[in-house]
């Protein structure tokens, strides 16, 4: 069984920063892809950022230049550094990992951007 545990969410003012982390534990050899998704109330879940085991990254247009995804393969962790946060970034942020042949999800961490 594989578990993903997120941390680092919270309340921040517009323009502020937060760093999310997700740690994977369990029985597996390697993690192919790790992502961060987010879901705001009344909206569909959207992909925020993706990072492969080789370090290639993809970002949603809405976060390019503000968010940075990184991972530590040895520690099976992925991070999301979020800068210049906007109220529209408010959502539950969920960690996702693709470990052949299964998709795994964390429980999510709330990020609220408000003054």
Image (spheres, helix red, strand yellow):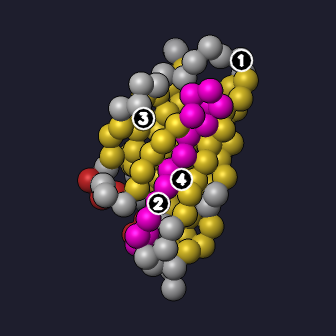
Q: Earlier in the sequence, mark 3 or mark 2?
A: 3
Kindly identify which numbered label has been placed on residue 27: 1
Q: Which residue is mark 2?
A: 82
Real-space CA distance between mark 1 and mark 2, rounded to the nearest whole angstrom? 30 Å
Q: Nearer the viewer, mark 1 or mark 4?
A: 1
Q: Nearer the viewer, mark 2 or mark 4?
A: 2
Q: Earlier in the sequence, mark 3 or mark 4?
A: 3
Real-space CA distance between mark 3 and mark 4, rounded to the nearest whole angstrom? 16 Å
Label 3 residue SS = strand
Q: Is residue 79 visible?
A: yes
Q: Is residue 5 left or right of residue 91?
A: right
Where does residue 52 sit, x and y in percent of width and height?
A: 42, 28
Q: Which residue is mark 3?
A: 51
What residue is drawn where x is 52% and y is 15%?
Answer: 100
Q: Nearer the viewer, mark 1 or mark 3?
A: 3
Q: Residue furthest left?
A: 61
Q: Earlier in the sequence, mark 1 or mark 4?
A: 1
**Considering only vertical position in the picture, is 59 above or below 51?**
below
What residue is drawn where x is 62% and y is 27%?
Answer: 74
Real-space CA distance between mark 1 and mark 3, rounded to the nearest whole angstrom? 21 Å
Where does residue 86 sit, x and y in percent of width and height?
A: 40, 72
Where does residue 5 sit, x and y in percent of width and height?
A: 68, 42
Q: Is residue 106 visible?
A: no
What residue is drawn where x is 49% and y is 33%?
Answer: 34
Real-space CA distance between mark 1 and mark 4, rounded to the nearest whole angstrom? 24 Å
| Marks 3 and 2 close (CB-CB < 8 Å) | no
Q: Earlier in the sequence, mark 1 or mark 2?
A: 1
Where does residue 67 sit, x and y in percent of width and height?
A: 40, 56
Crowdedness of circle 2 by 10 Å Cα count: few (<14), some, many (20+)?
many
The magenta span reads: 72-87
């Amino acid at each position: 069984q594989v578990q993903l545990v997120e941390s680092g969410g919270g309340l921040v003012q517009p323009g502020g920063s937060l760093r999310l982390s997700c740690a994977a534990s369990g029985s597996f050899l390697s993690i192919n892809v790790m992502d961060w998704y987010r879901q705001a109330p009344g909206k569909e879940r959207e992909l925020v950022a993706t990072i492969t085991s080789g370090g290639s990254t993809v970002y949603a247009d809405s976060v390019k230049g503000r968010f940075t995804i990184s991972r530590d393969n040895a520690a099976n962790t992925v991070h999301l550094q979020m800068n210049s946060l906007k109220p529209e970034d408010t959502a539950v942020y969920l960690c996702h990992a693709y470990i052949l042949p299964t998709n795994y999800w964390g429980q999510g961490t709330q990020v609220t951007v408000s003054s």
